[in-house]
Amino acid sequence: MTSFLRSDRSRPVAIWLFAVAFLVLCMVLVGGATRLTGSGLSITEWKPISGVIPPLSQKAWLAEFANYQRIPQYQFVNRGMSLAAFKGIYWWEWTHRLLGRLLGVVFFVPFVVFLALRRLPTRLIWRCVVLFLLGGLQGLVGWWMVASGLEGRVTVAPERLATHLGLALILYVALIWTACEAWEGAPRPSYQPRWALAALGLAVLVYVQSLLGALVAGNQAGLIYNDWPLMAGQVFPRAYIDGGLFHSLLHSQAAVQFNHRLVAYILFASALGLAIAAFRAPALARQTRRLFVVLAGLVTLQAGLGIATLMAHAPLSLSAMHQAGAAVVLACATALAWRSQRA
């Protein structure tokens, strides 16, 4: 095997990073289910180490339940909840946090092993360090988000939810990109900048749309304006401005849903137009052309799923599928942006 100092790729490293990216995807999906089931505030303390052990006795369960009964969500939304019902929401949040801890172990241990065996390409070492730090930061941001719902609110702050999801997706994208780099090796400086820029723009647009989706979820904006293509019979909702422009962009149900719709239209038109143009560009690499077409197809399916979810008043099953679809679209957009940087 090529020596550690000269090798620019490693398939085992790539597989490991793809596996970590899959775990991040699982975290995002479980996190979405946690939000949809109203479970995110069921654990009111942040215990990074000891929190891995759930309540093991009736006394411990009653203590956890007592902590939950002190926060506004219980007092104003779930008053009278039984202990059995509390256990149901507790396990969702506990599983989400357990996945976060597992993610740290699955990343750190192989990283150290690959370093010790001199199997990690030198050019990827600093990237892996940054990825590990991003994972640690994500844990802090997660608690910062939860803390916003423990006093004065019955849910977490929408902007903190969007920040938490946004950082998770940055980690997800960075893992996929780095895994591709480990699989293929260092890029050759031979690509078409126009197509590379277009692919990168699509990836950024998908990411922005995902954040807007988080604001819709955080404000429960999918429960209103359930007609389409209009919003309560209007092209532009009259309730868009609610307490100032900046506040509206983050907290107005009408504004966040309208913005999510608008960017969806832009993304759909952009993906479809670029797919058609790429299909007609014989000079473009075959894999890149195919990825443009696949991405357009995924965006179309995701748009249809989003409309169905909205018109059905955002049921749990469709909402979870829509969030999963967003992650798949982002993965494809990332692969396209990465591939377009190469010959």
Image (cartoon, rainbow, N blue to C red):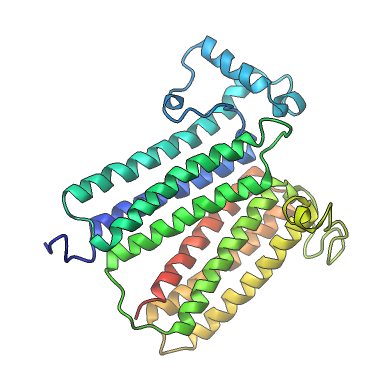
Is residue 226 shown to the viewer in this render? no
Indicate the quadrant where residue 304 lies.
Answer: bottom right
In the displayed structure, would residue 78 be above or below residue 114?
Answer: above
Quadrant in which the C terminus is drawn: bottom left
> Which residue corresponds to the image point at 54% horizontal and 83% vertical from the top-left?
276
Can you give x and y, in whole percent of width and height, for residue 228 in the image?
78, 62
> Which residue corresponds to the image point at 57% horizontal and 23% vertical from the top-left?
87
In the displayed structure, would residue 59 be above or below residue 45?
Answer: above
Is residue 65 shown to the viewer in this render? yes
Can you give x and y, in whole percent of width and height, for residue 7 in the image?
18, 65
Can you give x and y, in whole percent of width and height, for residue 9 in the image?
24, 64
In the foreground, 188 or 245: 245
Does residue 131 appear to the left or right of 298 in the view shown? left
In the foreground, 122 or 154: 122
Give the total of numbered labels.
Answer: 0
> Which residue corresponds to the image point at 57% horizontal and 64% vertical from the top-left?
206
Quadrant in which the N terminus is drawn: bottom left
In the foreground, 229 or 27: 27
Does residue 2 appear to the left or right of 169 in the view shown? left
Can you give x and y, in whole percent of width and height, for residue 288 in the image?
42, 77
Q: Residue furthest top?
A: 59
Does residue 56 appear to the left or right of 303 in the view shown? left
In the displayed structure, would residue 95 be above or below residue 54?
Answer: below
